[in-house]
Image (spheres, rainbow, N blue to C red):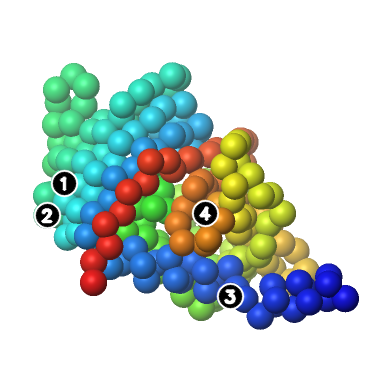
Amino acid sequence: MLSAILAAAIMDGPTPREELQAIFARLSKAESCEATITHWDSSLFFMGTFQQKLSWRKGGAFILRTTLTESGTAPPTWDSNGDKVKLIYRTGRTIEHKYRQPRGVSPAWEACAGILFSFLSGSDYAKSLLAEPKPIKLSKRLKELVGDEEVEGAMLEFNRGSRGRIGEEEVKEITLGFRAGENLTHSGSIFLTPDGRGFVAEEIIYPDHTGLRLYSDVEIIEGK
């Protein structure tokens, strides 16, 4: 009887997509965010184990800098005023890019900082992730990264995962996959705080390895 009640309660609760939409609504009103981001081969742009500090302000101003590198190549520092993003390399070399990228393009700083940054900035990626699912059409480059052409025409699907911990952290797992008919290709997981209000980690499944991005010391000041 108790198991039936619990099952009904779960079914009556928000779906994984609705939980993510609620986080998006919350973060879209944020005034600022401070966070530490630890990477284990999580970004194809910068492979390795390293840690970054994110300081983000509403309007597109942010600094994303590497504070610790254990292996691999450390990313540059990204310093944005909301109009231009300056890439500052350890050699002192700097390059500027526009903050606003062409539609559908996820810049390197967003790909590195992950879903927390995507939701804070209301990026195209975040919006596409939460939109009503439709058949996926991959660019040639994405096909190379995904490594599985069966994803072409598939539908993005969220499900509840079974893992309740990442290291010492309690989490709620949401799995991501691409469904084509009866086939479901698992592509990664998003780990939420136990109350479902924020992000703890992302796990990304690449063709040749699995990467992990962990968020800690997250401080968000919410707007009205």
213 to 115, vertically: above or below: above
Closer mark to the observer between disc 4 and disc 2 = 4
- Mark 1: amino acid: Ser
Quarter of image, res 2: bottom right
- Mark 3: amino acid: Pro
At label 2, counting other C-alpha atoms closer than 10 Å, the crowd grade (few under 14, some 14-19, many 20 or more) is few
**Observer able to see residue 172:** yes
Question: Do the numbered discs 1 and 4 sit on residues whose CB atoms are within 8 Å?
Answer: no
At label 1, counting other C-alpha atoms closer than 10 Å, the crowd grade (few under 14, some 14-19, many 20 or more) is many
Task: Give how far apart the Cα atoms at labels 4 and 2 are.
Answer: 32 Å
Quarter of image, res 194: bottom right
Q: What residue would you read off at disc 3?
A: 14
Q: Nearer the viewer, residue 137 or 198?
A: 198
Of the numbered discs 1 and 4, the one sitting upstream in the chain is: 1
Q: What residue would you read off at disc 4?
A: 193
Q: Is residue 81 left or right of residue 35?
A: left
Closer mark to the observer between disc 3 and disc 2 = 3
Is label 4 in a helix, a strand or a loop? loop
Task: Give how far apart the Cα atoms at labels 3 and 2 are.
Answer: 37 Å
Q: Residue at x 34, y 34 (%)?
A: 52
Q: What residue would you read off at disc 1?
A: 80
Q: Residue 223: image x %, image y %? A: 23, 66
